Amino acid sequence: MSVLSLNSMGETKRYVLHINKTDKTVEKYDTEDIESLESTPAPTDTRFEAVDLGLSVEWATANLDIHRSTKVANGPEGQGGHYGWGDPTGNHSEQPDNATWTPYEPDRAKCLSYYGGENPPKDICGTDLDIARVHWGGDWRLPSRAEQDELREKCEWTKETLNGVTGYRVTGPNGNSIFLPAAGFRFASSNFGGDYLSYYWSGTLNPNPGYSDYAYYLETTPDYHEWLSAARYIGQSVRAVRDAYNTILILKNGEKHVYRIDEIESITVEEFSTDEDYYEAVDLGLSVKWAAVNLDIDQYDYAAPAPEVLGGYYGWGDATGRNHSENEDDYPRYDSEKSISGTDLDLLHNYWGGSWRLPTMQECEELRNECTWTWEVVNGKAGYRVTGPNGNSIFLPTSGWRVGEKIDQSYVGTHGYYWSGTNVSAFYVYQIAFSQKYQWYYNYRYNGYQMRGVRK
């Protein structure tokens, strides 16, 4: 469903997906921002037992052991086998001829050929390089690093000895648990640390430059449980996962939201219309009314949810709101004073519609000269309370600014920057800029600043 913009009529229509949850909260997403929405079917393969821990995936109750007839370790405390990353056969322990802790010398290509090759996928979960998928089949696979991190962060870890084997009892948010034995690891043909520590492979390659010969794993000892990165030929344990019976929402910006089936009461789509009165306009006793909140095009209704919330950072004259270029030539420029307020280059006008637009330089000056500015902290966010001649007020939080992809966090909480719609010269655009000693000046149009709208 696409967005229908009727700015000339003062109305914008959109469709909004509502995830109505059983805890009575609602999460809303503009359908224009959704890449996909699907539910994973309930698994039918019952050969291997899975435990629902209340996470995004279900975890196997025992380790992989491809050399047993059952393909699974003998009980939760069974150590199972040690396998190289990206080796679906589970039979390789080859390393370079001078096998040492310095990896991949002297024959890197030969060594890597056994463990996914020189250029494996960034994530082998569920692929033909995934030893769990190859030997267990169905929906079983290696966990991703994110799924291991979820296990690490959202579960309670308790040291335990089960049938004489040390390890961790890992209890999920819903009270269910699994046992991870201290299974050690294999280096070449020798095993180490089987009564003390364990290494569990993820399916995720180390993405950092120069580290593609390594993959992430979960390491446990009696003192900690942490994910780290190791050479792919290290033999490690595998504790498989499978997708829970979930609804999965993927946004176009890459965000993934996983909802357990028992979390959702219903999913509905609402036709959502806004006119200029949808967004709160505050009459300060000036020539225009000022918006109560900042623009935020990543929110389903394009508005920050509260006055103290920063909202988005946008370049001047960028009608898409997505241009992060640091090249001035990638933004509109004029040799003399010109205002884009209310035009198709005005991002706020494009999203909020009606008569909403960026303020002009003169309207910013009016806000500066005719209002009282008081430094204030609202819900932990510092900024200015701007009170008009009639006693009404708005709050402008200190947001810092963005250059390119980077937001300068050192200025968030101390400095605020808000675009006007007025170009001053070929190099500068007028803006509201303030700290505890507020000021007004010009700056380059590629800077990412906040936008606070006005309307007649």
Image (tube, rainbow, N blue to C red):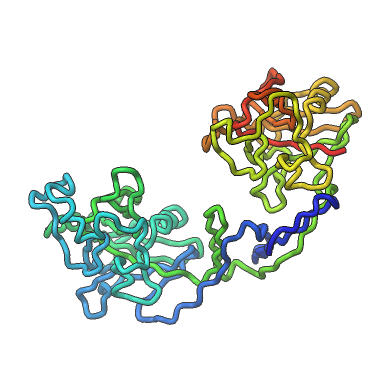
Residue at x-position 14% and y-position 55%: 95
Relative to residue 324, is residue 312 drawn left or right? right
Residue at x-position 27% and y-position 56%: 199
Reply above or below: 373 against 306: above
Residue at x-position 69% and y-position 61%: 2
- Residue 397: percent from the left, percent from the top? 69, 32
- Residue 347: percent from the left, percent from the top? 70, 42
Reply above or below: 312 against 400: below
Relative to residue 397, is residue 181 drawn left or right? left
Reply above or below: 370 against 61: above
Quadrant of the image for the N terminus? bottom right
Residue ranking furthest to the left: 97
Relative to residue 414, is residue 271 drawn left or right? right
- Residue 108: percent from the left, percent from the top? 17, 51
Q: Is residue 27 visible?
A: no
Q: How many marks?
A: 0
